[in-house]
Structures are given as C-alpha cells and as structure tokens.
Image (cartoon, rainbow, N blue to C red):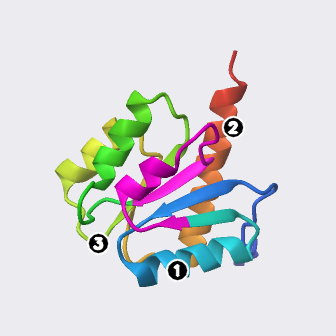
C-alpha cells in the first residue's frame, strides 16, 4: 500500500525569501511560485543588487544561484556571514561539482539544489531551511 501524498508544503507564516539569479526567467518564475504559496518573495538580478538592498531587515531565506555574472553565489554567502546576517541560504546551480557544493556547505548553505528542480523539492527544501533557522534562533 502506498503512503498518501501529503500534498504541497505551504509556509505557516509570511516568511521573506530573496531570489538572487541573473536569469530573468528563472527569477520571475521562482518569485511568482513563492508568492503564490504565501511567501514574501523578492527577486534580484545580481549578488551586488541583493547585498545593496540589505538594511535593518534581512530576508528569512536567500535562494541564490551559484554562478552569475559579477558576484557569485559563494561571494553572497561570504558577505552574509561576515556581516552577521543569519538568513537561511539555499544554493542552486545547473553546474555543481563536488568542490563548489562543499564550499557552499562550508559557508553555511542549508541545501544545494541542482537545476532544474521540482516545485515540490524547492518548497520542501525552503520549509526545512526556515524550520532549521527558527530552531537555531530559539536556542539559548
């Protein structure tokens, strides 16, 4: 007997997610998907634009492409970490190799997704990343 499909995973609150990808089609598609399920999604066409947008409020999660023109995903991770910004990070790429994936995890990535990925995988990964961020924040 097959176990029932639990259905889509939707956020329990309006978590903010920044999508950083230099491919406009990917950025728009992900922004629309995440907004449609209740996330506060915003897109940025470069790591530089994303980093310049950060003020007092940082996003709950950053979904960042590892290979972009200009600032790379790993550079975004480094700057977030050196700035003390505790956003959860999920990396994505169509070009992973072991070294790049290992470096992303060393700099605090919650997950490294290989493009193309399913909506279900993305939503469950974001849910896991946000849950882990909340659990870490709740630690004394």
Q: Position of residue 55 (x, y in %)?
A: 57, 41
Q: Within 10 Å of the Cα at label 2, are there few (<14), some (14-19), or many (20+) other Cα atoms?
A: few
Residue annotated with mark 3: 94
CA gap, disc 2 to disc 3? 29 Å
**Marks 1 and 2: CB-CB under 8 Å?**
no
> Where residue 48 sits in the image (x, y, percent)?
36, 54
Residue 14 image position (x, y, % from top left): 78, 57
The residue that mark 1 highlights is: 28
Residue 51 tag number: none
User: How packed is label 3: few (under 14 Cα within 10 Å), some, or many (20 or more)?
Assistant: few
Label 1's element? helix
Dot 1 or dot 3, earlier in sequence: 1
Which quarter of the figure has residue 16?
A: bottom right
Is residue 115 placed above or below 134 in the rendered structure?
Answer: below
Numbered disc total: 3
Residue 134's tag is 2
Residue 62 placement, left or right of 6: left
Task: Give the percent coordinates (x, y) of residue 111.
Answer: 44, 52
- In this view, the residue in front, 125 or 58, is 58
**Quadrant the C terminus occupies:** top right
Which label lies toward us, 1 or 2? 1
Mark 2 vs mark 3: which is more N-terminal?
3
Mark 3 secondary-structure assignment: loop
Identify which residue is drawn at 37% across, 43% down: 77
Q: Are marks 1 and 3 in contact (CB under 8 Å)?
A: no
Q: Nearer the viewer, residue 7 or 90?
A: 90
Q: Is residue 58 above or below residue 114?
A: above
At 61% from the left and 51% from the top, the residue drawn is 128
């Amino acid at each position: 007997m097959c176990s029932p499909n639990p259905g889509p995973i939707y956020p329990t609150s309006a978590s903010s997610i920044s999508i950083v990808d230099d491919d406009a089609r990917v950025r728009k598609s992900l922004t629309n998907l995440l907004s449609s399920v209740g996330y506060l999604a915003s897109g940025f066409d470069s790591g530089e634009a994303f980093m310049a947008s950060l003020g007092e409020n940082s996003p709950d999660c950053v979904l960042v492409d590892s290979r972009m023109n200009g600032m790379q995903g790993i550079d975004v991770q480094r700057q977030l970490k050196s700035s003390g910004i505790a956003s959860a990070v999920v990396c994505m790429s169509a070009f992973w190799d072991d070294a790049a994936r290992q470096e992303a995890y060393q700099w605090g990535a919650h997950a490294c997704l290989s493009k193309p990925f399913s909506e279900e995988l993305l939503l469950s990964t974001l849910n896991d990343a946000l849950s882990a961020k909340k659990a870490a924040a709740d630690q004394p």
